[in-house]
Amino acid sequence: MLSGLLVATIALIARKSPGLGGLIASIPLVSTLGMIWLWRDTGDPKLVADYVYSAFWYFLPSIPMFLLIPWMLRSGHGFWPALSAGIALTFILYLLTIGIAARFGVRL
């Protein structure tokens, strides 16, 4: 219910101000709520630290999606193909991140 309300609110705000909508959408609310709930459920500082550390490493490969989709849309591609390409790119980059991180001893 919370996520649906959040998405609807962001969409309404973005209609009037795309920049403000983007700012609100970029707030790491899901990650923060995950931290809070994980802490509340476990009280384990190592587990929460590992969760936050992993979230950071998974955030990095998602950044190119936010560049690819607007580029594709501005280049005349449809929304669904642009979104699909962004998701596919992110998935590929997630896999690469996991593999590269493992080579450097980073366990995700």
Image (cartoon, rainbow, N blue to C red):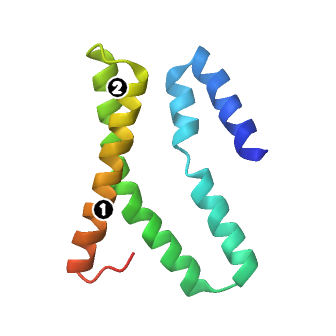
- Residue 70 placed where, x, y %? 34, 25
Label at residue 49: none
| Position in image of residue 34 (x %, y %) | 64, 64
In the picture provided, is 24 more to the left or to the right than 69?
Answer: right
- Rounded to the nearest angstrom, the CA distance separating label 1 from label 2 is 23 Å
Q: Do the numbered discs 1 and 2 sit on residues whose CB atoms are within 8 Å?
A: no
Which of marks 2 and 1 precedes in the sequence?
Answer: 2
Q: Position of residue 18 (x, y in %)?
A: 52, 21
Tell me, yes or no, if residue 56 can be seen here: yes
Q: Secondary structure at mark 1?
A: helix
Residue that appears at 62% across and 51% down:
29
Classify mark 2: residues with Cα within 10 Å, few (<14), some (14-19) or many (20+): some
**Mark 1 sits on what residue?**
95
Label 2, secondary structure: give it.
helix
Outermost residue to the right: 1
Is residue 12 shown left or right of residue 53?
A: right
- The amino acid marked with disc number 2 is Pro
The quarter of the rendered structure image containing the C terminus is bottom left
Q: What residue type is disc 1 on? A: Leu
Residue at point 52% right, 73% down? 51
75 or 42, nearer to the observer: 75
Res 66 visible? no
- Say whether residue 78 is left or right of residue 18: left
Q: Nearer the viewer, mark 1 or mark 2?
A: 1
Q: Is 77 situated left or right of 53 in this image?
A: left
For residue 70, the mark is 2
- Position of residue 24 measured from the top left corner of the image (x, y, whole percent): 58, 37
Residue drawn at 37 percent across, 64 percent down = 57
Position above or below: 1 against 32 = above
Residue found at x 31% / y 69%: 98
* Viewer-side residue, 43 vs 76: 76
Relative to 28, does residue 58 appear above or below in the rendering? below
